[in-house]
Image (cartoon, rainbow, N blue to C red):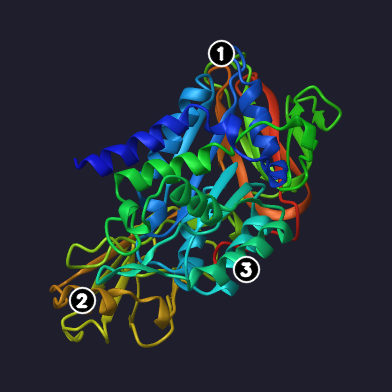
Amino acid sequence: MTTRLFAMLLAVLAATGAARAAAPQNPSAACIQRTMKALEASTAQNPAHVRVLFYGQSITAQAWTKIVQKRLAERYPTVRFEFRNAAIGGYTSNVLVRTADHDLYPWYPDLLFFHVYGPMDKYEEIVQRVRERTSAEIVLWTSHLNIVSKDKPDQVNTSHDERAVQIRAVAPKYRCMLIDLREKWRRHLTANNIAVKDLLSDAVHLNPQGCELYARLIEEELVRRPELGDDPAAAGTITTVPAGGADVAHGPDGRLTLRFTGNRVLAVSDGSGAAGAKATLLLDGKPMEGVKELWAITRPSVGPAKIWMPAVNHVAFDRPPVEEDWTLTCLGDSTPDGKKIHFKLQGGVTGDDGEGWSTERFVSRSGRAILEPPDWRIAWTLGYRKATLPEGFKVTWRSYPLFARVYEPQPAGTRTLLLQGCANQAHTLTLIPQGGKLGIGAFVVHAPATGQAQPAGR
């Protein structure tokens, strides 16, 4: 390591210890106070459960996210974090808006870190959909400084300055925390006499020193600020409903009926359930298998030539799916460049479900799979890799329920997803037991702040 790089790393590390105390007060931190309050209140006896998702493209896939995760886990050792990074390198907002139906909304984070380049209308559309479909608190930030190209290492790319203005407008519109990382980055470089290129591995991606700084500038603003006031409804509500409370009716046969408004419900076990007991579930008095909104599809598998991107960006459905694995097989009369692919589709339960071409809209015979021509990524992949379509290439995905068909007693403190994705309105959820007590101590109900949740298959 050169003396200059070593000095840069020391500057970043030395600042980390006092970073949160020295960070300027950010009033938009009010938009993550539900999460921060839960983190601060967590104890070994009553741990908080927090799901954290990082979503975007290659910058959001870099090592700085692991640093932030590590530091949050160290700051809050009793919290039961679920961290996930679903970023896709090279996917700008106009593409990510499609994959989000598989990656983002079904995972339903408590806290979302989101950054992506690309058209701002699609960027805003993703943020809006998070607000409509989940109760996640959202952290947005402006982009770091980068250079025009490696051939012009001293020329700063100013094209993202206008984008920063637009991001600053989107954040308050949807009650998101805004971290003005671009200005903080600029000030840090000036104060420490560091060139923009010195924190980059190429024209835009971060080197290890850049990742350290990026992580610090994000993590130092994740603080509890009670003086800002607690507005738990800013991102939607997360409400704990005791099983013995007024919103839970108890039938003579032991059934429980929860009255709730929202689109996601979990059961929290108190550990008192009877061995061998189980319960069937009804939403608004009906089985949930036939409710299309309560189903999701995994991100399709990656494309050929050892690419990291999915072969197909989006799979929709017209009819309620069933839980099964799907296989799309490219047939021999497809073009080698992947621009016109003839394929057949088969579901593990559905069976043969039709043939189609990548150049035409495809609706499977069952209505459980819909593919649009712009969502195919294979031709781009083959061109990028200078490769040809492998014989019999397969794309796979899985359709799965966002509900529990049967609830069985769990160890104390266990949280079980009962349903997710229904319209964000008033409902009843009924658990009909067999074989004894279910041992549910409470329900946790999530309700988005705005709008009605849109079906995952659209």
From what the image shows, is residue 433 above or below residue 260?
A: above
Residue 44 has which mark? 1
Residue 382 has which mark? 2
Residue 445 visible within the image: yes
Q: Secondary structure at mark 1?
A: loop
| Circles 1, 3 touching at the beta carbon (< 8 Å) | no
Residue 291 visible within the image: no
Residue 214 has which mark? none
Which label's residue is closer to the chain start, 3 or 2? Answer: 3
Name the amino acid type tagged 2: Leu
Q: Secondary structure at mark 3?
A: helix
- Quadrant where the C terminus sits is bottom right
Nearer the camera: disc 3 or disc 2: 3
Left or right of 2 on screen, residue 137: right
From what the image shows, is residue 328 above or below residue 105?
A: below
Residue 116, percent across and down? Answer: 48, 62
Q: Nearer the viewer, residue 115 or 162?
A: 162
Identify residue for label 3: 166
The answer for how far apart the CA atoms under marks 3 and 2 are is: 34 Å
From what the image shows, is residue 90 above or below residue 271?
A: below
Which label's residue is closer to the chain start, 2 or 1? Answer: 1
| Circles 3, 2 touching at the beta carbon (< 8 Å) | no
Q: Residue at x 44, y 53 (%)?
A: 323
